[in-house]
Every structure is written in C-alpha cells, then in structure tokens.
Amino acid sequence: MYRLSMTAVALLLASASRAAVAEDGAPSLVGQKAPEIQTKEWLNSDGRTRIADYAGEVVLVESFATWCGPCRGQMPHLTELTKKYGKKGLTVLSITQEPRETVLKFMSQLNSAPVEYTMGIGGGNGGYKTQFIPHAWLIGPDGNVVWQGNPGGLSEKVLDAELKKVVKPTPEQIEERAGLGLKFANELAKSNRYVEALTVLDRVAEKYKGTTTATQATERKAALEGDQAVASDLAAQKQIAKLVGAAEFHKDKVKDKQRESVASKLEAAAKDNEGKNPGAVALAQMWLTVMTEDWKPEK
C-alpha cells in the first residue's frame, strides 16, 4: 500500500488550507500572514496605520460600507468589543473604500450608536478579499490570521485565547508606537489640519503617559497652539469644530434641525476665512458638504 510521508501530508494540508474558503465564499486567510491594509485616511487613530504596528497585540480587521445594513448593525458590537477588550490588547480596524465625506455624512445623519473604534477610509481592501460584507479577520499577536467571518460570529472563546497570547511591549516598543502618533499628528499639521492634529496629540499624551514621546506630544501641542504663524487658522478651525461638535467625526446622529442651523454658520465661516485661513476654509467646506448633502448609498 502506498503511504504518504509526513512531509507530503503537511504539504497537502497546507495546500488545502490555502485553497479553502470561508463560509460566505471569501478566500480563507486563516493560518496565513495577515496582509497589510490600504487606506488613505483615518478616523479615531492613534497613529498606527499598518498591521505591523500592532505586533504582539490582537487586531480585528473588518471590511464594511455605510450602505451595508448588516455592517451598520455590527457597529454597536464592535464598539462593545473595543470597550471590553481594548485594554487587554484588542484593536478594531474597520476599513471601507468609501470617501471621507460619505462616511462622515452617514455618521452625522444616520448613525444612532456611538463608534469608539478606528476607521480606515478611502482605501482599497488590499489582500482582504471578500464577496460579502461585513466580513472580519482576527489577527493574533504573531501576525497570523486565526479566524475570519461575520464579526458577529466571533466567539469570546476564540478572542480570549488570542488575548492570552498578547505580548507586553517593551519600553522601546511603547516609545516607537507613541512616535507613530506624534508623526501622524505632525503630518496632519503640515496639511493645515490643526484641530485634528491637536486631537491626536492629546490621544498620544494620554495613551502613552509617562513616556518621553508623550511629553514631546504635550510640548508639540503647546508649540502649535502658540505658533503665531498658524494662530488665526487654528483659532478659526477650533470655532468650526465647536460649531459642528466634532474634531474628527460624530459618534452618533446629529438632529436635522441642528444640521440646518450649523450649515448656514459653516457657509458664513467659509466666506469669512477665505483668503487668510486656508485650513479653516477647507474644514468649513468639508463639513458644509456633510451637513447639507444627504447621505446616499454609493455602491
């Protein structure tokens, strides 16, 4: 009788794993190194933008779209996972190919549940291919995909098992992660997005409190707020953020009447800052679009 060697059996099993598909027809990544994600912008980010930045932690990457009803239904669940397991080493990265304005329109006009996790917007899905959304991939501390499927189907048993493998970061790794947040904030500032930069600096100072980089973030915030070259634009952006009630995005729905009132004030702010505060003009125009144009599904 012909018998397969252990090596041959292993190769066959590996081949079968690569050819496997998830229950919803998506190519299975389980057992493979997690692909990097592709995205243009981030909401509620701490500056880490690559899967590699989360080495030693657990990441749940979810593919979603605002036009997808089941995706919207998972938002409260993903927020709950973040609240329950965030401090234990879990990060939720929800990614969509939709542009920033589309996501912000939905968040401002229709979303009824707070969102506490990170969103990557305006990028492709990269290696995370799926025929149906929402679809999620759980990445273990070693960087390999350990589970995939509808995020609502992720069992606490599977999640707990991976969280037990979380590796405590070294002081050097903590400083490196804080440095990514500081770099991210500086990039926002260079793009005249000062209010968003201050938000990220606050996040870095709080999350990495006690580190050298956290101190640098606090100092950078003070320097930015004291920079006379940007003082006018920064002050105008702060007023706009206060007006709309958000620095990055609304965590829940804005009432229709409030949208109408805010829109007229945004239009005036855009005109008042024209020719002198480019960042404030861009911010006012972006939020004006969000407040005045109704969200529509964009498949």
Image: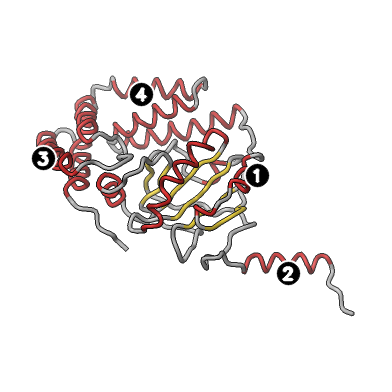
Q: Is residue 246 above or below residue 149?
A: above
Are circles 4 and 2 on residues that touch, CB within 8 Å? no
Looking at the picture, which amino acid does disc 4 mark?
A: Lys
Q: Which residue is mark 3?
A: 264
Q: Position of residue 17 (x, y in %)?
A: 66, 65
Q: Which residue is mark 2?
A: 12
Helix, strand or loop at mark 4: helix
Give me the residue at 36% from left, 53% from top. 122
| Furthest-bottom residue in this view | 1
Helix, strand or loop at mark 1: helix
Crowding at dot 4, Cα within 10 Å, few <14 / some 14-19 / many 20+, comes out as: many
Crowding at dot 3, Cα within 10 Å, few <14 / some 14-19 / many 20+, comes out as: few
Q: Is residue 209 above or below residue 179?
A: above
Are circles 4 and 3 on residues that touch, CB within 8 Å? no
Q: Which residue is mark 1?
A: 161
Q: Position of residue 29 (x, y in %)?
A: 58, 59
Looking at the picture, which amino acid does disc 3 mark?
A: Ser
Crowding at dot 2, Cα within 10 Å, few <14 / some 14-19 / many 20+, comes out as: few
CA gap, disc 4 to disc 2? 56 Å
Are circles 3 and 1 on residues that touch, CB within 8 Å? no
Give the number of the mark in front: 3 or 1.
1
Q: Position of residue 97 (x, y in %)?
A: 37, 56
| Furthest-right residue in this view | 1
Q: Nearer the viewer, residue 257 or 64?
A: 257
Circle on res. 221: 4
Q: Is residue 175 above or below residue 78?
A: above
